[in-house]
């Protein structure tokens, strides 16, 4: 049986951190290229749900910009589903399949492993979201009026950093969960689609709903992106784009720092309580 | 020793035990109170998305027949996504998660009846959530629901035939899931999403582009949802009809006919996919995906 060559040079510090990030993101980036059936399952099929909501708006004779809101919401939904099922619950799946213990005993940091998952997931999901945007725009003749391209890019990037920071943070909480993890993730779909305004402007809610919903970065991110991408966007926005950029920056920093400390704490707690290798089915 | 258990007895035992097992799997991960909240919050949030969408555009004119149409259609569509997907999800659960499917195959049970039994828990949970959604609609959203004018015989017969039809479609989907390796976990949701679009659940089929409408007309779910609307809120269905050329009895006959046809297709499809899965060694194939 062929043996791997002995490690001739030990990598530590930032180099090891970056190698771990690369190593964990690799299967997600390359997997998307090798298993191309995602084009059908993750782009074309979600389009059916998007189309259903588009036709609801058409049936009740909504202004055409609302069709664009649904398409953008459908694309951003791909990121939420990725964070929910492939970031937050990922350490639970890794525990179920026995990989988690291997992560813990490897010299790489858990923070780097989570960052690798985030980078890989973000890449693969961006492709899916772009597919939904392009397909939805073509099928339903969505008319974008971009007010500021650079602000739009900035809002998107800040939203993604904050969102995946949230995913890294909640991943540590899932370390302590067992069978209920699946149900919690399942529950965090429709209620989040509702309070984050995936299919309509959040301005229509009483103010306390978007305030609570803003804990999910997509709430402010989508509101800002709609304001920057559609003619009627600014009049339907909740607060100004500048305020949303400031809050998103705060959320991104807060979630990443919280992820760092929470992961460390939860890992110690899980070790102490012997939950890293348990599998209660 | 030759197995002398009568076939019907074996099928009933498989169904009954699977129903009990399904209920335990669905419910015993938490305490009953949290489970009840969980069972309500998700479908209620899905309904509220449509309520807000409609309210934003119509400026909260909830007494319109259009709103009653989409609200009731969406509420009863919960059966489609839960019962049909629930039956097929048992394959994913038992093969991928619990890794017990191969043991089930070598035990003296009927696999199709076992799968149908696994859907029973979903029927019960869905019924509970549909009742809650309708109650919210009546109490807060002006859904014109009057028990005295409900066509109860039509409602009960349509509901039962519809659940049977959905369970049989679930069996077909379970066969397809069994045959798939990658992505088997989201086939159910994908099919439910497609049916949501084409079945006239939340908007009339006539809103679809003309070339897509035939897809809605060949699906039994479209007729089932229309019968449910006519039985529960006949006035709304008359103001906003989906099949104006058909009487209630004609629609019921169409639903029964389609249930029988899809039942045969499902049994045939299950046998075919089951055979292919055995032949290709897919019964115990896991991918950790």
Image: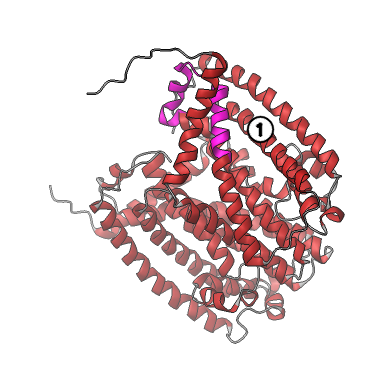
Q: Can see residue B40? A: no
Asked if residue A275 is positioned above or below residue A139 in the image, the reply reads above
Which residue is depicted at the point 54% across and 23% down?
A18
Residue A119 lies in the magenta stretch: yes
Q: Circle 1 marks a residue in which chain?
A: A
Task: Tell me which segment is drawn in magenta.
Answer: A95-122
State the residue in front, B13 or B193: B193
Q: Secondary structure at mark 1?
A: helix
Residue B93 lies in the magenta stretch: no
Residue picked out by circle 1: A166
Which residue is depicted at the point 76% across and 36% down?
A248
Visual colour scheme: secondary structure
At which x and y percent is residue A124? 54, 43
The number of numbered discs placed on residues in the rendered structure image is 1
* Number of other residues with Cα within 10 Å of mark 1, as a class: few under 14, some 14 to 19, many 20 or more: many
Asked if residue B114 is positioned above or below residue B266 in the image, the reply reads above
Asked if residue A89 is positioned above or below residue B136 in the image, the reply reads above
Which residue is depicted at the point 50% across and 72% down?
B219
Residue at the bottom extreme, as displayed: B245
State the residue in front, A85 or B222: A85
At which x and y percent is residue A134? 62, 58
At which x and y percent is residue B66? 73, 71
Which residue is depicted at the point 43% across and 21% down?
A102
Task: Using the rendered view, name the quadrant where residue B134 is placed.
Answer: bottom right
At which x and y percent is residue B11? 31, 56
Image position of B271 (left or right of B25): left
Q: Can see residue A61? A: yes
Q: Could you tell me which quadrant the C terminus of chain B lies in?
A: top left
- Which SS does the magenta portion mostly show? helix
State the residue in front, A90 or A15: A15
């Amino acid at each position: 049986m062929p043996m791997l060559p002995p490690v001739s040079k030990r990598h530590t510090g930032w180099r090891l951190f970056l190698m771990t990030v690369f190593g964990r993101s690799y299967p997600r980036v390359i997997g998307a290229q090798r298993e191309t059936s995602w084009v059908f399952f993750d782009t074309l099929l979600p389009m059916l749900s998007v189309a259903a909501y588009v036709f609801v708006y058409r049936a009740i004779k909504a202004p055409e910009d609302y069709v664009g809101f649904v398409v953008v919401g459908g694309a951003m939904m791909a990121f939420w589903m990725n964070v929910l099922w492939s970031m937050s619950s990922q350490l639970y799946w890794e525990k179920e399949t026995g990989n988690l213990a291997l992560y813990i005993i490897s010299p790489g940091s858990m923070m780097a492993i989570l960052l690798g998952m985030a980078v890989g997931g973000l890449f693969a999901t961006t492709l899916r979201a772009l597919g939904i945007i392009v397909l939805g725009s073509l099928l339903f003749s969505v008319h974008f009026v971009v007010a500021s391209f650079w602000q739009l890019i900035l809002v998107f990037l800040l939203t993604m950093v904050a969102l995946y920071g949230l995913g890294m943070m909640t991943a540590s909480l899932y370390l302590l969960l067992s069978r209920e993890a699946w149900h919690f993730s399942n529950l965090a779909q429709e209620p989040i689609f509702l309070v984050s305004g995936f299919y309509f402007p959040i301005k229509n809610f009483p103010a306390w709903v978007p305030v609570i919903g803003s804990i999910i970065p997509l709430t402010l991110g989508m509101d800002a992106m709609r304001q920057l991408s559609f003619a009627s966007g600014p009049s339907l926005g909740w607060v100004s784009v500048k305020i949303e950029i400031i809050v998103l920056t705060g959320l991104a920093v807060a979630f990443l720092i919280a992820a760092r400390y929470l992961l460390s704490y939860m890992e110690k707690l899980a070790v102490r309580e012997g939950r890293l290798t348990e599998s209660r089915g | 020793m030759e197995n002398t258990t009568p076939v019907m007895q074996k099928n009933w035992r498989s169904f009954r035990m699977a129903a009990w097992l399904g209920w335990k799997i669905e419910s015993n991960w938490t305490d009953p109170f949290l489970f009840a909240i969980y069972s309500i919050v998700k479908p209620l949030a899905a309904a509220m998305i449509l309520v807000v969408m409609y309210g934003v555009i119509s400026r909260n004119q909830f007494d319109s027949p259009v709103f009653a149409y989409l609200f009731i259609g969406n509420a009863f569509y919960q059966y489609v996504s839960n019962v049909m997907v629930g039956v097929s999800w048992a394959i994913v659960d038992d093969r991928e998660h619990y890794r017990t499917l191969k043991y089930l195959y070598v035990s003296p049970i009927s696999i199709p009846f076992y799968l149908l039994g696994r859907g029973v828990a979903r029927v019960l949970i869905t019924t509970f959530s549909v009742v809650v959604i309708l109650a919210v609609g009546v109490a807060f959203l002006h859904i014109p629901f009057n028990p005295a004018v409900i066509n109860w015989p039509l409602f009960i017969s349509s509901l039962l035939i519809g659940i049977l039809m959905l369970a049989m479609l679930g069996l077909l989907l379970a066969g397809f899931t069994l045959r798939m390796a990658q992505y088997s976990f989201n086939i159910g949701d994908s099919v439910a999403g497609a049916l949501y679009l084409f079945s006239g659940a939340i908007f009339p089929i006539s809103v679809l582009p003309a070339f897509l409408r035939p897809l809605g007309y060949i699906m039994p779910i479209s007729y089932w949802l229309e019968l449910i609307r006519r039985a529960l809120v006949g006035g709304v269905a008359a103001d906003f009809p989906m099949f104006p050329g058909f009487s209630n009895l004609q629609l019921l006959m169409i639903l029964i006919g389609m249930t029988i046809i899809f039942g045969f297709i499902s049994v045939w499809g299950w046998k075919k996919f089951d055979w292919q899965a055995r032949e290709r060694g897919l019964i115990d194939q896991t991918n950790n995906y």
